[in-house]
Image: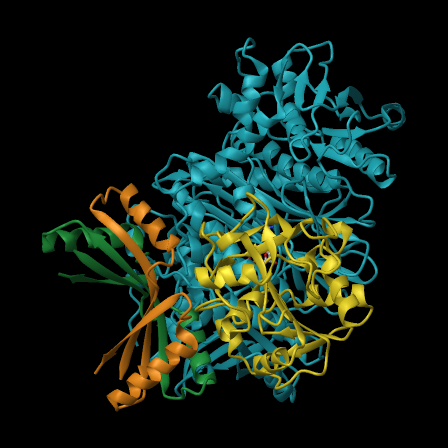
Chain colours: A yellow, B orange, C green, D cyan
Amino acid sequence: MKSAVVVFPASNCDRDAAVALEHLTGEKPHMAWHADTDLPDVDLIVLPGGFAYGDYLRCGAMAAQSRIMRDVKKKADQGVTVLGICNGFQVLTETGLLPGALMRNAQLKFVCKPVGLEVEETQSVFTRKYDKGQKLSFPVAHGDGNYFADDETLDRLEGEGRVVFRYAQGENPNGSARNIAGILSEKRNVLGLMPHPERVCDPMLGGTDGVGLFQSLIEALS
Amino acid sequence: MKARVFVTLKNGVLDPQGKAIGNALHGLGFGQVGAVRQGKVIDIELEERDHAKAQASLKDMCEKLLANTVIEKYEIELKS
Amino acid sequence: MKARVFVTLKNGVLDPQGKAIGNALHGLGFGQVGAVRQGKVIDIELEERDHAKAQASLKDMCEKLLANTVIEKYEIELKS
Amino acid sequence: MTDITPQTVREHGLSVEEYGRIKQLLNRDPNLVELGVFSVMWSEHCSYKSTRAHLRRLPTKAPWVLQGPGENAGVIDIGDGDVAVFKMESHNHPSFIEPYQGAATGVGGIMRDVFTMGARPVAMMNALRFGAPDHPKTRHLVSGVVSGIGGYGNCMGVPTVGGEVNFHRSYNGNILVNAMCVGLARGDKIFKSAAEGAGNPVVYIGSKTGRDGIHGATMASAEFNEDSEEKRPTVQVGDPFTEKLLLEACLELMATDAIIAIQDMGAAGLTSSSAEMGSKGGSGIELDLDRVPQREENMTAYDMMLSESQERMLAVLKPGREGEAERIFKKWQLDFAVIGRTTDSGRLIVKHKGAVVADMPVHALSEEAPVYNRPFERRTPASGSPPYDRARPVMDSLVRLMASPDIASRRWVWEQYDNTVMADTVQRPGGDAAVVRVHNTDKALAITTDVTPRYCKADPFEGAKQAVAEAWRNLTAVGATPLAVTDNLNFGNPEKPEIMGEIASAVDGIAEACRALDFPVVSGNCSLYNETNGEAILPTPAIGAVGLLKNVNRMATIAFKRENDAILLIGDTKGHLGQSIYLREIEGKEEGAAPPVDLSAERKNGDFVRSLIEAGKVDTVHDLSDGGLIVALAEMALPTRIGAKIALPATGDAIAFLYGEDQARYLVAAADAERILADAKAAGVSAVLLGRTGGDKIAVEGAGEIAIAALARAHEGWFPSYMGGTELSPSN
Ligand SMILES: Nc1ncnc2c1ncn2[C@@H]1O[C@H](COP(=O)(O)OP(=O)(O)O)[C@@H](O)[C@H]1O
Ligand SMILES: [Mg+2]
């Protein structure tokens, strides 16, 4: 599986994503600079966590306008798999590749902690190695992870099986609508999620629950 | 030309920040305070003489960048 | 009564947000954009009929909570 | 040009004698720009004029110390060509005035000190002291400081992995915000600040210069009084996004060999960076201010020289390398300008609009800065062991202590910091020391910050020893070999002999402990004049420390891991209750002698515990500090909810045994007690078997029991409920 990680000037989980990818696929991902015009041909594009352009104005708003995102958009439309983690999820909603918006956490504070998740949907290239209803623990680390969409959109997401991860009962760290932690695009090739799977791919760091996500991708895309 | 753009959450979108300010004002003894909403104000200097053109490009800026219309609405105020 | 309070950074205080927005607007091709500053707007509903009293308590709120006058200034706008 | 009147001199915080000395060094009257430059260079903050004579007593050398005090940060060897670079610094005064921005820019400043040395920051810590919880300002300050630290550090993508939070009324008007940054570099890629050689370009990198915080350095050197809040000195606003760009751009430039010297612009910006670089390199510097990137119009030379705008650096490049450097900085969208050159004149010459606006010998600004041997009086240490109610139920007190402001869980704080970014955080906040793996290796750094100000107040010498000993013990408790220290000396007004006495004794205490523990001081910072209306803070010599775990797979944590493990107490217990948390919280007394620190016992017991961890015999360790044995036991039970049942040794009073704060002690848990007892005997270390893990209670034979669930509620509850409803973060 060939992959690329997009690097915005203040991405800061780009290395973490690259380490996890290299560790699990055995191949170094291509690191794509935000000012580049296009990406090489890859099976997976990762938009990593961080603060893109400082996350001023709104998280992900400026990144969504960056040069490289035009190509990401084009490739996503062509069906290339795109994974947006945390800030990457915010960029995806700002770009319109995913519906809804990520608002300020309801309790108005940045929150960094492991949270319980439930795998809601295994019919996806991102989650096929997990079991439906499987309980996972991924860390979150964000100030703006409160997923919002109107009821119609939420109903559609649920109806079409596009809610992939939900925060477990009582674990919603940010006030997200319907406990949504990660969603798929209509074509199911784009996933955005707030929790960080790449930070739980090494037992030393408190767990390996994130490995399944990358292995799903490897199985589906290699 | 100078412009002031207001970006506020749409009605119906929960505004915890506004609520927190309201609570804090109550705590400080300002009992007369009712609903509070917080938004952004963006002051922009524009090199543009034509009022209509300025208005149009500000609208464009709002749609493209300044507001996320999924959750926010905007108002534009042009000053001379 | 409804009030709108603007809290903005004092002149001369670095405004990283405004700077970044300005850069982004330029990047989007809005070359006519000059200086950009970002601030907060707080809309407050007040149960108060007396204009002067409202004005005075809003000032009080700004001084005590809404603005940190070390770096921020505020303006109060009363509507009806 | 404005005339210099006695009032101008006073407003610049210079004494009549100091002004006389300036005239002598210049052979003439200074102009206003020069006066401004002298005032910041000779301020307490930059010159250490009150403490310098004392700081010389600190031990700073060891075979693994590659750079001691005197550079932007200390550097230690951690093997395989890797080095750790670290320093701690205060941002106390600005944080009191504008907690969010004050704390944020404090974080930014200390990070620059570390990456200006060529290191990538890998961990942040912060040591915070606030006023009494019931003081009307405390909540607002806690909320602003914590979100400011998070706001900056999170955006930088450097994990904030630990620190301390204390509350005491002595900080009501002077909170302390001490931030520590630890970075990693290769030993052969360390950058320093000596601007050697003449004719080399001096380049300005980073953000534009505005009129930010002019006179911040002099403000940090003056006492607060009631109307200083009214005068409202300017506080800088931080821009973490630009700092992140600056970090990456600097590291990219450092990967070339274009740099001769580099120095962050911290307090007193352009002035101190240029003067320090010139003075260390023995060269002169000529600056042309017209070339300085400016944010505001009509800035004067005075403004530019004294501006404390953040996120800026000054570097001296090899001639001809400007283009290469410029390309890198343009890529990162940062300002870059050649603003001067080095000379062999030994003078700092500043030009503005075609005229020379300042011309001063560089050495006059730095080496000739005043050093004071201020009069000091050493205090007689508090003594005695205050009486207490021996009949008080032991377990009720435990619940109260677990919910007391200084012991309650700090989760509310650390969950606002990204503590796992960079994917190397092996021990998160909540243990004895944070552990951060060296990327791509099996070794790791252990990091801690410690000081117990109430001990320092009672006895500045023993208290300072204790701070070092506790830091050493915390590193040891995770299995690390303690390597070196950075310190942040926070005190009141040094012009008062009793405060100067506290400083002198604290330095002696640090020096003695560091020497005994082979734990040299490699960097540090002093923050004086922490007084409001004549009332000083508790003496607070914060100690930041770094240790090395050679094999991160042999590491201990505080959490009980198995049922039926033996629980052993290492070290002697006399039941020292003087100045303990127990006395303060339960009996309402801040009295008695501070616990004495036996450094040879510290060393012996610590080396023993570390050897157990390294040998894989023990993976569960907690050192004993605030609250004594029973609080430590509760803290070990809470993470996994595995309880414990212990028995008191035959002798002594239960309260003193359980709550005493005797030093040099650890609790360890392991399956095999006999082997550890035998090892201890062989090592001449005192060890006793207290009991075993298991169940869902903490039970002490003869003294009662308490459910862990109740302890958890007490421990986790205080902070969120104290901060509840005040979740207004000042920025964004
Ligand atoms: N209390 C202290 N103990 C040891 N070294 C100190 C202490 N205070 C300051 N130093 C050292 O003095 C030098 C100057 O400190 P400082 O002015 O804070 O540096 P910077 O300007 O880089 O922030 C540094 O090398 C610092 O490590
Ligand atoms: Mg420095």
Asked whether, in this view, residue D394 is left or right of residue D724, the answer is right
Question: In which quadrant of this rendering is ligand 1 seen?
Answer: bottom right
* Residue D364 visible in rendering: no
The residue located at (56%, 37%) in the rendering is: D409
Q: Is residue D459 found left or right of D62 in the rendered image? A: left
Estimate the x, y position of residue D551 in percent, counting from the top left.
83, 49
Inspect this view and state whether residue D509 appears: yes
Nearer-the-camera pick, D588 or B70: B70
Residue displayed at 47% across by 84% down: C27
Query: Looking at the image, which is closer to me, D729 or D245?
Result: D729
Report the side of D348 relative to B39 (left or right). right
- Tell me: residue D524, above or below residue D369: above
| Above or below: residue B6 compared with residue A129 | below
Judge from the rendering whether residue A176 lies leftward or rightward of residue A71; answer left or right: left
In the depicted view, which residue is nearer to us: D93 or D511?
A: D93
Q: In x, y percent, where is residue D161? A: 63, 50
Occupied quadrant, residue D307:
bottom left
Specify the quadrant that holds the N terminus of chain D: bottom left
**Above-or-below relation of D651 to D146:** above
Q: Position of residue D603 (x, y in %)?
A: 77, 35
Q: Where does the C terminus of chain D fall, quadrant-wise? A: bottom left
Residue B41 locus on image (x, y percent): 32, 68
Residue D266 vs D553, above or below: the answer is below
Q: Residue at x 43, y 64 (%)?
A: D237
